[in-house]
Image (cartoon, rainbow, N blue to C red):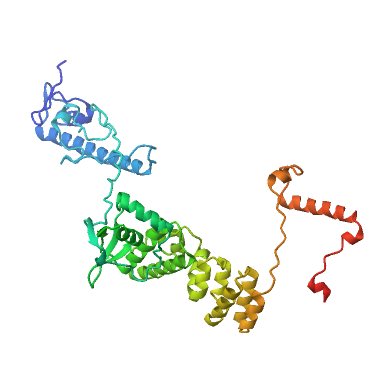
Amino acid sequence: MAETNTTATAGGVDNVKGPETLLDYVTSPNTADAPGDVVVPSNVIDGLFEEKRAAAEEAAKKAAEQEAAAGDEAPAKKGRGSRPPKEKTGKEPGAENPEAKKRGGKSADTAGGTGGSPEKEESAPEPSPAPPRDATRPGETEKIEYIKHADLHPFKGHPFQVRDDDAMKALIESVKERGIDQPALVRPREEGGYELVAGHRRQHAAELAGYADVPCVVRNMTDEEAVLAMTESNFNQRSEILASERAQALKMQLDAIKRQGAKGGEITNGELGKRSNEIIAERNNMSIKNVQRYIALNNLVPELMKLVDDKKIKFTSAVDFSYIKPKNQQYIALALESSEISPSLKQSERIRELDQKGILKADVIDGILLEEKKEETRVIFNSAELGKYFGPEKTPREIKDQIIKLLDDWKEKQPPELTKPAKTKETEK
Protein backbone atom coordinates (compact mmCIF):
# COMPACT_ATOMS: atom_id res chain seq x y z
CA MET A 1 0.00 0.00 0.00
CA ALA A 2 1.36 3.35 -0.95
CA GLU A 3 2.22 5.80 1.87
CA THR A 4 0.03 8.88 2.18
CA ASN A 5 2.00 12.13 2.38
CA THR A 6 0.84 15.72 2.72
CA THR A 7 2.88 18.58 1.44
CA ALA A 8 2.27 22.25 2.25
CA THR A 9 4.35 24.95 0.74
CA ALA A 10 2.75 27.88 2.62
CA GLY A 11 3.62 28.78 6.20
CA GLY A 12 6.79 26.64 6.22
CA VAL A 13 5.11 23.64 7.93
CA ASP A 14 5.73 19.99 6.90
CA ASN A 15 4.20 16.64 7.78
CA VAL A 16 0.92 17.96 9.23
CA LYS A 17 -1.34 14.93 9.83
CA GLY A 18 -4.58 14.15 11.59
CA PRO A 19 -8.24 14.10 10.84
CA GLU A 20 -8.78 17.40 12.55
CA THR A 21 -6.78 19.13 9.83
CA LEU A 22 -6.93 17.24 6.56
CA LEU A 23 -9.52 14.45 6.93
CA ASP A 24 -12.31 16.47 5.50
CA TYR A 25 -10.21 17.36 2.48
CA VAL A 26 -8.79 13.83 1.92
CA THR A 27 -12.21 12.17 2.12
CA SER A 28 -13.85 14.65 -0.17
CA PRO A 29 -15.46 13.31 -3.37
CA ASN A 30 -12.64 14.68 -5.42
CA THR A 31 -9.77 13.02 -3.52
CA ALA A 32 -11.07 9.98 -1.63
CA ASP A 33 -10.50 7.53 -4.46
CA ALA A 34 -7.37 9.15 -5.90
CA PRO A 35 -4.31 6.86 -5.63
CA GLY A 36 -0.81 8.02 -4.67
CA ASP A 37 0.13 11.38 -3.11
CA VAL A 38 -2.45 13.88 -1.90
CA VAL A 39 -1.48 17.44 -2.56
CA VAL A 40 -3.28 20.07 -0.41
CA PRO A 41 -3.42 23.60 -1.76
CA SER A 42 -1.64 26.31 0.24
CA ASN A 43 -4.80 28.39 0.76
CA VAL A 44 -6.34 25.45 2.66
CA ILE A 45 -3.27 25.19 4.90
CA ASP A 46 -3.42 28.95 5.59
CA GLY A 47 -7.09 28.72 6.51
CA LEU A 48 -6.44 25.88 8.96
CA PHE A 49 -3.61 27.77 10.72
CA GLU A 50 -5.72 30.94 10.83
CA GLU A 51 -8.43 28.99 12.66
CA LYS A 52 -5.87 27.62 15.14
CA ARG A 53 -4.49 31.09 15.81
CA ALA A 54 -7.98 32.53 16.33
CA ALA A 55 -8.84 29.72 18.73
CA ALA A 56 -5.60 30.28 20.66
CA GLU A 57 -6.26 34.02 20.91
CA GLU A 58 -9.81 33.42 22.18
CA ALA A 59 -8.55 30.94 24.80
CA ALA A 60 -5.86 33.39 25.92
CA LYS A 61 -8.39 36.20 26.23
CA LYS A 62 -10.75 34.10 28.38
CA ALA A 63 -7.90 32.87 30.56
CA ALA A 64 -6.67 36.45 31.10
CA GLU A 65 -10.17 37.60 32.09
CA GLN A 66 -10.54 34.71 34.55
CA GLU A 67 -7.13 35.43 36.06
CA ALA A 68 -7.96 39.13 36.47
CA ALA A 69 -11.30 38.32 38.11
CA ALA A 70 -9.65 35.84 40.47
CA GLY A 71 -7.01 38.44 41.38
CA ASP A 72 -9.67 41.03 42.32
CA GLU A 73 -11.62 38.61 44.53
CA ALA A 74 -8.66 36.96 46.26
CA PRO A 75 -7.64 38.56 49.59
CA ALA A 76 -4.19 40.08 49.78
CA LYS A 77 -1.58 37.87 51.40
CA LYS A 78 -0.33 39.10 54.78
CA GLY A 79 3.06 40.72 54.64
CA ARG A 80 3.20 40.98 50.84
CA GLY A 81 2.46 43.76 48.45
CA SER A 82 0.09 43.54 45.51
CA ARG A 83 1.36 42.06 42.26
CA PRO A 84 2.89 44.75 40.03
CA PRO A 85 1.33 45.19 36.57
CA LYS A 86 3.09 43.56 33.63
CA GLU A 87 5.14 45.76 31.40
CA LYS A 88 3.67 46.39 28.00
CA THR A 89 5.72 44.85 25.17
CA GLY A 90 3.70 46.19 22.28
CA LYS A 91 2.31 42.69 21.48
CA GLU A 92 -1.19 41.51 22.17
CA PRO A 93 -1.71 38.11 23.88
CA GLY A 94 -1.62 35.35 21.32
CA ALA A 95 0.24 37.44 18.73
CA GLU A 96 2.26 35.50 16.20
CA ASN A 97 5.72 34.62 17.51
CA PRO A 98 8.31 32.53 15.67
CA GLU A 99 9.45 30.81 18.86
CA ALA A 100 5.89 30.09 19.83
CA LYS A 101 5.20 28.50 16.49
CA LYS A 102 8.05 26.03 17.06
CA ARG A 103 6.40 25.04 20.38
CA GLY A 104 3.08 24.26 18.79
CA GLY A 105 1.85 27.57 17.49
CA LYS A 106 1.11 29.11 20.92
CA SER A 107 2.50 32.36 22.17
CA ALA A 108 4.46 32.53 25.42
CA ASP A 109 2.00 35.20 26.55
CA THR A 110 -0.92 32.82 26.15
CA ALA A 111 -2.25 31.76 29.55
CA GLY A 112 -2.18 28.01 30.01
CA GLY A 113 0.21 27.53 27.08
CA THR A 114 2.49 24.52 26.97
CA GLY A 115 6.19 24.44 26.48
CA GLY A 116 6.89 27.75 28.29
CA SER A 117 7.93 28.23 31.92
CA PRO A 118 5.19 29.71 34.18
CA GLU A 119 5.57 33.39 34.98
CA LYS A 120 7.12 33.96 38.41
CA GLU A 121 4.98 36.14 40.70
CA GLU A 122 6.90 39.05 42.17
CA SER A 123 6.04 41.00 45.30
CA ALA A 124 5.76 44.77 45.15
CA PRO A 125 8.58 46.51 47.00
CA GLU A 126 7.75 47.82 50.47
CA PRO A 127 7.07 51.58 50.43
CA SER A 128 10.05 53.48 51.74
CA PRO A 129 9.46 55.87 54.67
CA ALA A 130 9.00 59.53 53.87
CA PRO A 131 12.22 61.53 54.20
CA PRO A 132 12.50 63.80 57.26
CA ARG A 133 10.87 67.17 56.76
CA ASP A 134 12.58 70.49 57.20
CA ALA A 135 11.82 71.93 60.62
CA THR A 136 11.26 75.41 59.19
CA ARG A 137 7.94 76.49 57.78
CA PRO A 138 7.18 75.05 54.31
CA GLY A 139 8.14 77.29 51.44
CA GLU A 140 10.20 79.60 53.64
CA THR A 141 13.87 79.75 54.43
CA GLU A 142 14.27 80.81 58.04
CA LYS A 143 17.47 82.01 59.58
CA ILE A 144 18.55 83.51 62.87
CA GLU A 145 19.00 87.26 62.96
CA TYR A 146 20.47 89.31 65.81
CA ILE A 147 18.08 92.18 66.55
CA LYS A 148 18.75 95.11 68.90
CA HIS A 149 16.52 95.58 71.93
CA ALA A 150 15.22 98.93 70.66
CA ASP A 151 13.74 97.17 67.60
CA LEU A 152 11.90 94.53 69.64
CA HIS A 153 8.38 95.31 70.89
CA PRO A 154 6.21 93.22 73.26
CA PHE A 155 3.26 91.28 71.91
CA LYS A 156 0.06 93.34 71.82
CA GLY A 157 -2.12 92.33 74.78
CA HIS A 158 0.53 89.92 76.06
CA PRO A 159 -1.13 88.13 79.01
CA PHE A 160 2.03 86.77 80.65
CA GLN A 161 3.94 88.99 83.03
CA VAL A 162 7.72 89.37 82.99
CA ARG A 163 8.55 89.41 86.70
CA ASP A 164 11.89 90.22 88.29
CA ASP A 165 11.69 87.30 90.69
CA ASP A 166 14.11 84.56 91.70
CA ALA A 167 13.44 82.68 88.47
CA MET A 168 14.44 85.75 86.45
CA LYS A 169 17.64 86.13 88.46
CA ALA A 170 18.54 82.53 87.68
CA LEU A 171 17.82 83.10 83.99
CA ILE A 172 20.05 86.19 83.92
CA GLU A 173 22.94 84.25 85.43
CA SER A 174 22.44 81.48 82.88
CA VAL A 175 22.49 83.99 80.00
CA LYS A 176 25.69 85.55 81.34
CA GLU A 177 27.42 82.17 81.44
CA ARG A 178 26.14 80.50 78.26
CA GLY A 179 24.35 83.18 76.27
CA ILE A 180 20.88 82.61 74.77
CA ASP A 181 20.75 79.05 73.49
CA GLN A 182 17.16 79.33 72.15
CA PRO A 183 16.31 82.21 69.79
CA ALA A 184 13.17 84.28 70.25
CA LEU A 185 10.35 84.20 67.71
CA VAL A 186 9.36 87.54 66.18
CA ARG A 187 7.29 88.87 63.29
CA PRO A 188 7.75 92.11 61.31
CA ARG A 189 5.59 95.12 62.26
CA GLU A 190 3.98 97.41 59.70
CA GLU A 191 5.17 100.46 61.66
CA GLY A 192 8.72 99.16 61.77
CA GLY A 193 10.69 96.89 64.06
CA TYR A 194 9.58 93.47 65.22
CA GLU A 195 6.90 92.14 67.55
CA LEU A 196 7.98 89.50 70.04
CA VAL A 197 5.83 86.39 69.73
CA ALA A 198 7.80 84.10 72.04
CA GLY A 199 10.82 84.98 74.17
CA HIS A 200 9.82 87.96 76.33
CA ARG A 201 11.65 86.64 79.39
CA ARG A 202 14.74 85.75 77.36
CA GLN A 203 14.84 89.21 75.82
CA HIS A 204 14.51 90.85 79.25
CA ALA A 205 17.22 88.62 80.72
CA ALA A 206 19.57 89.33 77.79
CA GLU A 207 19.12 93.08 78.25
CA LEU A 208 19.82 92.88 81.99
CA ALA A 209 22.82 90.60 81.31
CA GLY A 210 24.39 93.29 79.13
CA TYR A 211 23.75 91.91 75.64
CA ALA A 212 23.14 94.51 72.92
CA ASP A 213 20.95 92.23 70.78
CA VAL A 214 18.94 89.01 70.82
CA PRO A 215 19.03 86.05 68.40
CA CYS A 216 15.62 85.84 66.74
CA VAL A 217 13.79 83.82 64.11
CA VAL A 218 11.83 86.25 61.92
CA ARG A 219 8.58 84.77 60.64
CA ASN A 220 5.64 86.27 58.77
CA MET A 221 2.54 85.28 60.74
CA THR A 222 -1.14 86.18 60.77
CA ASP A 223 -2.63 87.56 63.98
CA GLU A 224 -4.27 84.20 64.71
CA GLU A 225 -1.05 82.25 64.12
CA ALA A 226 0.89 84.66 66.33
CA VAL A 227 -1.63 84.36 69.19
CA LEU A 228 -1.55 80.56 69.11
CA ALA A 229 2.25 80.43 68.90
CA MET A 230 2.62 82.92 71.76
CA THR A 231 0.19 81.18 74.13
CA GLU A 232 1.40 77.65 73.40
CA SER A 233 5.04 78.67 73.87
CA ASN A 234 4.36 80.19 77.29
CA PHE A 235 2.16 77.30 78.42
CA ASN A 236 4.94 74.85 77.54
CA GLN A 237 7.93 76.76 78.92
CA ARG A 238 6.74 78.63 82.02
CA SER A 239 6.89 76.71 85.28
CA GLU A 240 4.45 79.01 87.12
CA ILE A 241 1.42 80.61 85.49
CA LEU A 242 -1.00 82.85 87.39
CA ALA A 243 -4.74 82.22 87.16
CA SER A 244 -5.24 85.59 85.47
CA GLU A 245 -2.54 84.79 82.88
CA ARG A 246 -4.02 81.41 82.02
CA ALA A 247 -7.54 82.85 81.87
CA GLN A 248 -6.56 85.62 79.45
CA ALA A 249 -4.36 83.34 77.32
CA LEU A 250 -7.11 80.73 76.93
CA LYS A 251 -9.58 83.46 75.94
CA MET A 252 -7.12 84.71 73.30
CA GLN A 253 -6.69 81.15 72.01
CA LEU A 254 -10.46 80.67 71.84
CA ASP A 255 -10.99 83.87 69.85
CA ALA A 256 -8.12 82.99 67.48
CA ILE A 257 -9.52 79.48 66.83
CA LYS A 258 -12.96 80.96 66.09
CA ARG A 259 -11.49 83.42 63.61
CA GLN A 260 -9.41 80.70 61.97
CA GLY A 261 -12.48 78.52 61.58
CA ALA A 262 -14.42 81.41 60.03
CA LYS A 263 -11.57 82.07 57.58
CA GLY A 264 -10.95 78.42 56.79
CA GLY A 265 -7.58 78.60 58.56
CA GLU A 266 -5.25 75.97 59.98
CA ILE A 267 -7.64 73.54 61.65
CA THR A 268 -6.41 69.94 61.53
CA ASN A 269 -8.54 67.13 60.11
CA GLY A 270 -9.00 65.70 63.61
CA GLU A 271 -10.43 69.03 64.80
CA LEU A 272 -12.99 69.50 62.01
CA GLY A 273 -16.54 69.61 63.35
CA LYS A 274 -15.46 70.21 66.94
CA ARG A 275 -16.40 73.20 69.06
CA SER A 276 -13.77 75.85 69.69
CA ASN A 277 -13.56 75.21 73.43
CA GLU A 278 -13.19 71.47 72.74
CA ILE A 279 -10.22 72.16 70.46
CA ILE A 280 -8.65 74.42 73.12
CA ALA A 281 -9.15 71.74 75.78
CA GLU A 282 -7.42 69.07 73.67
CA ARG A 283 -4.51 71.32 72.70
CA ASN A 284 -3.85 72.23 76.34
CA ASN A 285 -4.62 68.81 77.86
CA MET A 286 -7.51 70.21 79.91
CA SER A 287 -11.17 69.34 80.35
CA ILE A 288 -13.76 71.44 78.53
CA LYS A 289 -15.34 72.40 81.86
CA ASN A 290 -12.02 73.67 83.20
CA VAL A 291 -11.45 75.72 80.05
CA GLN A 292 -14.86 77.31 80.50
CA ARG A 293 -14.12 78.08 84.16
CA TYR A 294 -10.82 79.78 83.39
CA ILE A 295 -12.36 81.83 80.59
CA ALA A 296 -15.12 82.91 82.99
CA LEU A 297 -12.47 84.42 85.29
CA ASN A 298 -11.96 87.16 82.68
CA ASN A 299 -15.24 88.65 83.96
CA LEU A 300 -13.73 89.38 87.39
CA VAL A 301 -12.96 92.98 88.32
CA PRO A 302 -9.20 93.65 88.67
CA GLU A 303 -9.41 93.81 92.49
CA LEU A 304 -10.91 90.32 92.73
CA MET A 305 -8.54 88.95 90.07
CA LYS A 306 -5.58 90.14 92.11
CA LEU A 307 -6.93 88.29 95.17
CA VAL A 308 -7.18 85.15 93.04
CA ASP A 309 -3.56 85.51 91.87
CA ASP A 310 -2.49 86.08 95.49
CA LYS A 311 -4.31 82.84 96.40
CA LYS A 312 -6.63 84.65 98.83
CA ILE A 313 -9.64 83.34 96.92
CA LYS A 314 -9.95 79.72 95.90
CA PHE A 315 -10.44 78.94 92.24
CA THR A 316 -14.00 77.53 92.61
CA SER A 317 -15.14 80.56 94.63
CA ALA A 318 -13.58 82.89 92.07
CA VAL A 319 -15.60 81.19 89.32
CA ASP A 320 -18.80 81.85 91.30
CA PHE A 321 -17.85 85.51 91.78
CA SER A 322 -17.21 85.88 88.02
CA TYR A 323 -20.97 85.53 87.38
CA ILE A 324 -21.85 88.35 89.81
CA LYS A 325 -22.53 91.92 88.73
CA PRO A 326 -19.35 94.09 88.67
CA LYS A 327 -20.73 96.49 91.30
CA ASN A 328 -21.28 93.66 93.78
CA GLN A 329 -17.84 92.25 92.89
CA GLN A 330 -16.38 95.54 94.10
CA TYR A 331 -18.22 95.13 97.42
CA ILE A 332 -16.89 91.57 97.76
CA ALA A 333 -13.32 92.72 97.11
CA LEU A 334 -13.59 95.44 99.78
CA ALA A 335 -15.07 93.03 102.31
CA LEU A 336 -12.38 90.42 101.71
CA GLU A 337 -9.51 92.92 101.88
CA SER A 338 -10.73 94.42 105.17
CA SER A 339 -11.47 91.09 106.87
CA GLU A 340 -8.54 89.15 105.39
CA ILE A 341 -10.65 86.03 105.17
CA SER A 342 -11.05 83.50 102.39
CA PRO A 343 -14.64 82.68 101.46
CA SER A 344 -15.76 79.08 101.48
CA LEU A 345 -17.45 77.43 98.51
CA LYS A 346 -20.83 77.50 100.28
CA GLN A 347 -20.46 81.23 100.99
CA SER A 348 -19.57 82.06 97.38
CA GLU A 349 -22.50 79.96 96.14
CA ARG A 350 -24.93 81.81 98.45
CA ILE A 351 -23.60 85.20 97.34
CA ARG A 352 -24.00 84.21 93.69
CA GLU A 353 -27.59 83.00 94.25
CA LEU A 354 -28.58 86.22 96.01
CA ASP A 355 -27.03 88.29 93.22
CA GLN A 356 -29.05 86.39 90.60
CA LYS A 357 -32.22 87.07 92.62
CA GLY A 358 -31.35 90.78 92.70
CA ILE A 359 -31.28 91.08 96.50
CA LEU A 360 -27.51 91.18 97.09
CA LYS A 361 -26.25 94.30 98.88
CA ALA A 362 -23.07 95.37 100.60
CA ASP A 363 -24.35 94.61 104.13
CA VAL A 364 -25.59 91.18 103.02
CA ILE A 365 -22.15 90.43 101.59
CA ASP A 366 -20.50 91.45 104.87
CA GLY A 367 -22.93 89.31 106.86
CA ILE A 368 -22.28 86.20 104.78
CA LEU A 369 -18.48 86.60 104.71
CA LEU A 370 -18.29 87.26 108.48
CA GLU A 371 -20.21 84.10 109.33
CA GLU A 372 -18.21 81.57 111.26
CA LYS A 373 -17.24 78.81 108.88
CA LYS A 374 -17.94 75.34 110.21
CA GLU A 375 -15.39 72.76 109.34
CA GLU A 376 -16.74 69.50 108.01
CA THR A 377 -15.92 66.54 110.24
CA ARG A 378 -14.00 63.89 108.40
CA VAL A 379 -12.44 60.68 109.62
CA ILE A 380 -10.17 59.03 107.07
CA PHE A 381 -8.99 55.42 107.22
CA ASN A 382 -6.38 54.07 104.85
CA SER A 383 -6.57 50.62 103.27
CA ALA A 384 -3.89 49.18 105.55
CA GLU A 385 -5.84 50.15 108.66
CA LEU A 386 -9.11 48.74 107.35
CA GLY A 387 -7.37 45.63 106.08
CA LYS A 388 -6.84 44.48 109.70
CA TYR A 389 -10.61 44.09 110.16
CA PHE A 390 -12.07 43.55 106.67
CA GLY A 391 -11.04 41.22 103.91
CA PRO A 392 -10.14 42.39 100.39
CA GLU A 393 -13.47 41.13 99.04
CA LYS A 394 -15.42 43.76 101.02
CA THR A 395 -16.63 46.79 99.09
CA PRO A 396 -16.36 50.35 100.56
CA ARG A 397 -20.13 50.42 101.00
CA GLU A 398 -20.11 47.13 102.92
CA ILE A 399 -17.26 48.37 105.11
CA LYS A 400 -19.14 51.59 105.90
CA ASP A 401 -22.36 49.72 106.76
CA GLN A 402 -20.46 47.37 109.04
CA ILE A 403 -18.74 50.24 110.88
CA ILE A 404 -22.06 52.06 111.43
CA LYS A 405 -23.63 48.85 112.75
CA LEU A 406 -20.77 48.38 115.22
CA LEU A 407 -21.10 52.01 116.35
CA ASP A 408 -24.84 51.53 116.88
CA ASP A 409 -24.13 48.49 119.04
CA TRP A 410 -21.54 50.45 120.98
CA LYS A 411 -23.92 53.40 121.44
CA GLU A 412 -26.63 51.19 123.00
CA LYS A 413 -24.20 50.13 125.70
CA GLN A 414 -23.27 53.71 126.72
CA PRO A 415 -24.92 55.74 129.52
CA PRO A 416 -27.84 57.91 128.31
CA GLU A 417 -26.09 61.22 129.06
CA LEU A 418 -23.23 60.36 126.70
CA THR A 419 -25.49 59.64 123.73
CA LYS A 420 -27.44 62.93 123.77
CA PRO A 421 -26.91 65.03 120.59
CA ALA A 422 -24.83 68.18 120.95
CA LYS A 423 -26.76 71.43 121.27
CA THR A 424 -26.71 73.74 118.28
CA LYS A 425 -28.05 77.21 117.61
CA GLU A 426 -30.94 75.66 115.73
CA THR A 427 -31.98 73.42 118.69
CA GLU A 428 -31.65 76.27 121.19
CA LYS A 429 -34.22 78.44 119.38
| Coordinates of residue 356 in the picture (x, y in percent) | 60, 80
Res 372 visible: yes
At 41% from the left edge and 63% from the top edge, which residue is drawn? 163
- Residue 427 shown left or right of residue 53 in the figure: right
Above/below status of 44 relative to 2? below
Left or right side of 110 for 375: right
Percent position of residue 242, x then y:
47, 64
Q: Quadrant of residue 166?
A: bottom left
Dividing the picture into quadrants, the one containing residue 3 is top left
**Quadrant, the N terminus:** top left
Residue 35 placement (x, y as % from top left): 13, 22
Q: Residue furthest top?
A: 1
Residue at 44% over, 69% down: 248
Count of numbered circles in the view: 0
Q: Toward which corner of the image does residue 125 lie, by quadrant?
A: top left
Residue 275 at least partly seen:
no
| Picture quarter with the C terminus | bottom right
Farthest residue toward the left? 9
The residue under the point 57% across, 66% down is 314
Residue 140: percent from left, percent from top: 22, 58
Viewer-side residue, 79 vs 192: 192
Q: Nearer the viewer, residue 206 or 130?
A: 206
Q: Say above or below: 152 vs 327.
A: above
The residue nearer to you, when weighing 348 against 281, is 348
Towards the viewer: 425 or 124: 425
